Image (cartoon, rainbow, N blue to C red):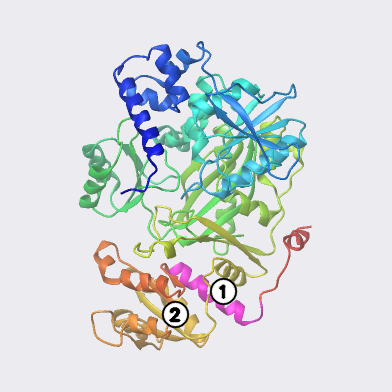
Amino acid sequence: ITHIKPWFIGQMRELVQLEEQVLQYKGKLLPDDLLRQAKEDGFADKYLARILGVAEEDIRKQRIPLGIREGWEPVPVSGVEDAAYYYSTYNAPDQVEVSDRPKIMVLGGGPNRIGQGIEFDYCCVHAAFSIREAGYESIMVNCNPETVSTDYDTSDKLYFEPLTVEDVLSIYEKERPEGVIVQFGGQTPLNIANELEAAGVKILGTSPVSIDLAEDRDRFRQIMRKLGIPQPESGMASTLPEALEIAGKIGYPLMVRPSYVLGGRAMEVIHDEEMLRHYVMAAVDISPERPILIDKFLENAIEAEADAIADGTDALVPAVMEHIELAGVHSGDSACVIPPISIPLKHIETIKEYTRKIAVELGVIGLMNIQYAIANDTVYILEANPRASRTVPLVSKVCNISMARYATEVMLGKKLADLGLTVKPVGYFGVKEAVFPFNMFPEVDPVLGPEMRSTGEVLGMADSFGMAFFKAQEATQSVLPLVGSVLITVAERDKPGVIEAARQFSGQGFKILATEGTSRFLRQQGIETAEIFKLKQGRPNIIDAIKNSEIQLIINTPRGKSSHEDDSYIRQAAINYKIPFITTPAAALAAAKGIAARKKGEALVKSLQSYHEELG
């Protein structure tokens, strides 16, 4: 029935039978022989600890004196002489030699997924290069064949292993490196950093204690008060009554998320008590150890972020990035621009000053990323991450400062003053745009929010913001049109925000199509529109126009769950018929500027090196 070969069924049956034997010892350690058999059959320490109800450390302490250790087999690289990478096994002796050179180990990011992408691999690769240049043997631990860090010639040694405490410790004990870099691989290696340090691993750069401090909202809030840095009102809750009490003090709307996540997973903007009750009831693993974080949501705020290199006593901020979408869209999904286009200079200087203060106070050694929101002429800090961020490659390319390389040198003992770095003003623009997989999931409503959905990003560079934005859209394979019709249908709260974009589109010769409410509003602003039916209002309607190629660009913003069923069909039709679509007023205005810039002339092809020469 399944077409699975009987041999494989037999292998699975043996594993199930072995696990049944293991479960007979629940609450205590296994007999030595059974432990050896379980390890040789592929049972990880963590899995055994979980099903037995004991500590993983106890499993490790039992097996190591018994000589149950990982051995490594070299796998030759096809077509390359004297090149190999290494896989572990508990079923054979160790075949890999160890040199007497001083070594540094880098932990990669593991499998790519939303929130944990190739940008972190970029940092790991440049760390490996920097380590080799400093005269150390570089050792990479990663298990993703689709990355550059797992190319055979990136590091001196590549251990193709999962990022688990068991595997990393085994390699550490074998190679005895001077230290391990955990802050470049995203959340994956950070999740095991405390356990590694507790087991005796020397963590290079920012300590796991400082990394945890940034996640501990109560302690972090106290530090911000000490430094005099404004922060939205916030709190932590591990029960529904606690969450309701905090909401009563802060007031709605709220931004709510679990602690210790990357990519904004399960993050939501909460508008009322009913939504909050539903969120808490549905929350997974909520506990005093893993509370939910509740912040006052700053409406209509401009969001910005800064990446920094710090040495424990000083910090360098190469650039401040302005998000094109307003606060509420995850930073990984929002388009952003270097240098900022609408943030006043005083706020840019404030962001740089706050970033330096926080980096020094937290004792950051290496990279750090801080998210800010600007509302009511005040810069608020949203969160600080003492690790590499997904924007590091973009800042590095735009500013011609290889942040990961310099951060590695700092972690190896240098001070910022030794590096001779200077930040030069950028006379061109770099626009980052996110790449989304919505075409692979046509049933998913492609609305941006606080939970990350993008699977990659691109960079557009040009001498004007508009052209850089246009190039970035082109790179995502969502090319903005130069002629035709623009459909505008937006929620009530977003109508004032699309006036300028609609005016610019109209001025560029586009025909403006709009649904009844939006059309009436735009006409009141003196913008000529042609009214078009929604799906259930009659024919021809929006879907007919999309199918007949009568619409070249769609601007559509939903209004929460009340409008979800009403207009999600527009965005899904845009995906199916490959029509560029925009779901925020800010991005609509950026698109209008991009089209205007492109209409003035062809986009110039210019090398990155040519841009860097302009920096002097």
The residue drawn where x is 52% and y is 79% is 481
The residue drawn where x is 66% and y is 81% is 601
- Neighbours of disc 2 within 10 Å: few (<14), some (14-19), many (20+): many
Check if residue 593 falls in the magenta segment: yes
Check if residue 489 falls in the magenta segment: no
Q: Which residues are magenta?
A: 585-602
Residue 502's disc number: 2
Residue 15 percent coordinates (x, y): 37, 29
Res 416 seen here? no
Disc 2 is placed on an element classified as: helix
User: Considering only vertical position in the picture, is 413 above or below 4?
Assistant: above
Residue underneath mark 1: 594
- Distance Cα–Cα, label 1 vs label 2: 14 Å
Disc 1 is placed on an element classified as: helix
Residue 566's disc number: none
Quarter of the image with the C terminus is bottom right
Residue projecting furthest to the front? 6
Q: Main secondary structure of the magenta part?
A: helix
- Neighbours of disc 1 within 10 Å: few (<14), some (14-19), many (20+): many
Res 327 seen here? yes
User: Considering only vertical position in the picture, is 436 above or below 274?
Assistant: below
